[in-house]
Image (cartoon, rainbow, N blue to C red):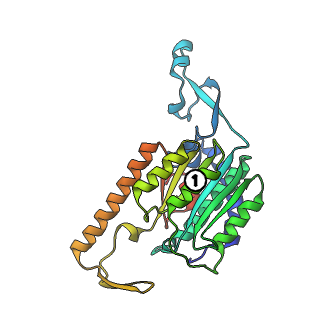
């Protein structure tokens, strides 16, 4: 699939309810699912209760357990009425994929799921879309209804692309830092492959001072490894190049570059204490967010 389809993105709203039911039935939260990953983000401590089989041992209150003599776990109450901001990369380099779908389509699906989930939690949802869109960057003020989410999804599904020079993720992050209200939850959905990692770090540090930030890095298998399929002609605007994918040394350098980038992003997220999720173009986005990635 080259472009996301609005009907599919709207239909994902019904998937949220089904995912909630399945999670409640299973009583299990894997490290990669939405509930586990964002537990504690926008959550307030409420009370403690006796431990039951299936509870996450990370939330055992050891002081209370020692005092009572029986395992006790902390419970949390979701903060309602917060702002959720989706920062979405719509640059040309996102319209790429060698398996299943394009990164741009996967990004739109993730944005839809996060938007619908946030509305279900009674949050206000808005966003910043940057890249090949009119004016290069567009801001959508958070609101507690479907209207803003639908406007964002329509823009992501628009096939009348306005080709621009790449808009840096740093620019979008700086914009988010200016418009986001304190204590907002900000999801940044991109492949983070274009731009200076140091500049991205500075922008994220500024954003983290007032908001909770979660990064979702979307990638294709060909981003990290090129199969040996012979010469490839790469065409970008007026620039053309031939890459010999059968050259083992060249492929190894390509893999090394990916690994360096991957480590840099992981280290960055650890440094600013921001969760990081990796989602490829093959993975079911529902499973990526709500279950194990």
Q: Quick one: which residue is furthest to the left in this view?
A: 249
Would residue 101 be seen by someone viewing this image from the given angle?
no
User: From the viewer's perspective, is residue 285 above or below residue 32?
Assistant: below
Which of 11/69 is in front? Answer: 11
Q: Quadrant of residue 14?
A: bottom right
Residue that appears at 63% across and 24% down: 49
Percent x, y for residue 195? 43, 63
**Which residue is drawn at the image coordinates 66% and 61% (left, top)?**
139
Residue 132 located left or right of residue 265: right
In this rendered view, identify the residue nearer to me: 108 or 54: 108
- Residue hosting label 1: 187
Q: Secondary structure at mark 1?
A: strand
The answer to which image quadrant residue 24 occupies is top right
x 54%, y 22%: residue:
71
| Residue 270 at x, y percent in the picture | 42, 44
Percent position of residue 217, x then y? 48, 59
Residue at 58% from the left image edge and 40% from the top image edge = 39
Quadrant in the picture for the N terminus: bottom right
């Amino acid at each position: 699939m080259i472009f996301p389809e609005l009907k599919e993105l709207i239909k994902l709203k019904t998937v949220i309810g089904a995912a909630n039911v399945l999670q409640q039935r299973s009583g299990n939260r894997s490290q990669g699912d939405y509930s586990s990953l964002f537990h504690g983000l926008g959550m307030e401590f409420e009370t403690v209760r006796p431990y039951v089989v299936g509870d996450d041992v990370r939330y055992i209150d050891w002081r209370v357990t020692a005092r009572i003599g029986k395992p006790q776990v902390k419970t949390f109450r979701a903060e309602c009425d917060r702002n959720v901001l989706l920062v979405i990369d719509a640059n040309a380099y996102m319209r790429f994929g060698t398996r299943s779908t394009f990164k741009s389509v996967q990004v739109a699906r993730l944005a839809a799921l996060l938007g619908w989930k946030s509305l279900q939690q009674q949050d206000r949802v808005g966003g910043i879309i940057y890249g090949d869109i009119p004016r290069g960057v567009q801001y959508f003020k958070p609101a507690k209804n479907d209207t803003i989410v639908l406007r964002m999804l329509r823009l992501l599904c628009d096939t009348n692309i306005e080709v621009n020079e790449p808009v840096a993720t740093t620019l979008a992050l700086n914009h988010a830092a200016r418009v986001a209200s304190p204590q907002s939850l900000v999801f940044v959905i991109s492949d983070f492959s274009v731009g200076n990692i140091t500049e991205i770090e500075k922008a994220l540090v500024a954003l983290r001072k007032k908001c909770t930030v979660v990064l979702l890095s979307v990638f294709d298998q060909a981003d990290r490894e090129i199969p040996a399929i012979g010469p490839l002609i790469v065409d970008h605007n007026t620039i053309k190049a031939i890459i010999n994918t059968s050259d083992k040394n060249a492929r190894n350098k390509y893999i090394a570059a990916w690994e360096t980038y991957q480590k840099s992003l992981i280290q960055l997220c650890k440094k600013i204490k921001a969760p990081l999720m990796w989602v490829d173009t093959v993975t079911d986005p529902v499973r990526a967010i709500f279950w194990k990635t």
